[in-house]
Amino acid sequence: MAAGGRRTAKSLVSRGAARPRSPRMESVVVEGKNEIERSLSSDILELHEKALREGAETYIDPATGFTVFTRNAHLKKKRCCGCHCRHCPYDHVNVRTKDSDKAALEEEPANQSDTGETAPRSVVYTKGGDKGKSSLFTGERREKTDCVFEALGAVDELSSHIGLARAMLRDMAKEASGEVMLTGYLEEIQQELMNAGTVVATPLANSDNEVMRSVIDKYTFPEKTKEMEGLIDKIDARLVPLRVFILPGGGNVASAQLHVCRTTCRRAERRMVEVSGMYGEQYTDHLRQATVYVNRLSDFFFVAARSVAEEDIVRN
């Protein structure tokens, strides 16, 4: 029986059996571990087996913090996606190799349709959320309108706005070293926001998921907040004393975009506060720590926007 104790409609076959040629066909479950699983550590294999016993479709790799699909998730798809997944139960039948590409070129008709019917299905879409629900990192399914997903969406949106600010600042960095420093720090902020999102998506207070607990326990929001406060003080000390309200857009486009980051950050903080108010007892103190970090982050964007605008004024 395949890992997870489930069988497909097709019979289990040995590794020597013929493989389906078309990626559109349902793949056949193969007995035993695939080549990647045979190289995994016992800790990872035990983690995967635990996820299977709980009926989970994902687990978190403790070394990387990445979300990994279990065999349960792949069995639902009923075919190999061709992406060389860690726990593929189909022995990676649709993974492309040099030999398979050569054979495909020899067999494909010259006037292949532009509809893309022969292309393997992308793993970008899973169809798991088509009914309006999505999963937390604990495996729990909730409505997409739940405040947790509102908070996750706001944090994701904030990271996207920061990415745009970074791109704008890179163009300006040829003229000023200050933007070079700021661009690097913005990337660090994006990394920290990913950690904040992980915390929001993982209510652990009443969970025995020691793997995720060990991952989140490594986050250092208080230290990062303190570091940011020092940077805010450093930047603010260089600025002209503020005596009036600021209208975003009075400087350059990068400064205006940093104000967009600031306001988006405020919304992300409000959504995280809402999660705490609604489900606070389900979370460890990491949610409070992450919320404080995001609160301080909006202050950072305020002084950063002013700094970029003033430097541009001085240069011109």
Image: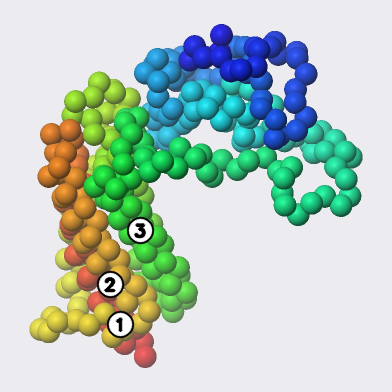
Q: What element carries label 2?
A: helix
Q: Residue at x 63, y 41 (%)?
A: 121
Q: Is mark 1 on a helix, strand or loop?
A: loop
Q: Do the residues labelled 3 and 2 touch (CB within 8 Å)?
A: no
Marks 3 and 1: which is nearer the front? 3
Q: In this view, does 244 lie to the left or right of 53?
A: left
Residue underneath mark 1: 249
Q: Looking at the picture, how far across and down is residue 170, in whole percent?
A: 45, 70
Residue 268: in sight, yes or no?
A: yes
Q: In which quarter of the image is the C terminus?
A: bottom left
302 versus 23 height, above or below? below
Tell me which numbered mark, 3 or 1, is placed earlier along the sequence: 3
Residue underneath mark 2: 259
As measured in the structure, the alpha-carbon distance from the residue carrying label 3 to the one carrying label 2 is: 14 Å
Q: Looking at the picture, how far across and down is residue 168, in whole percent?
A: 43, 72
Where residue 232 sits, quadrant-wise, is bottom left
- Crowd tier of the residue under label 1, counting other residues whose Cα lies within 10 Å: few below 14, some 14–19, many 20 or above: some
Residue underneath mark 3: 157
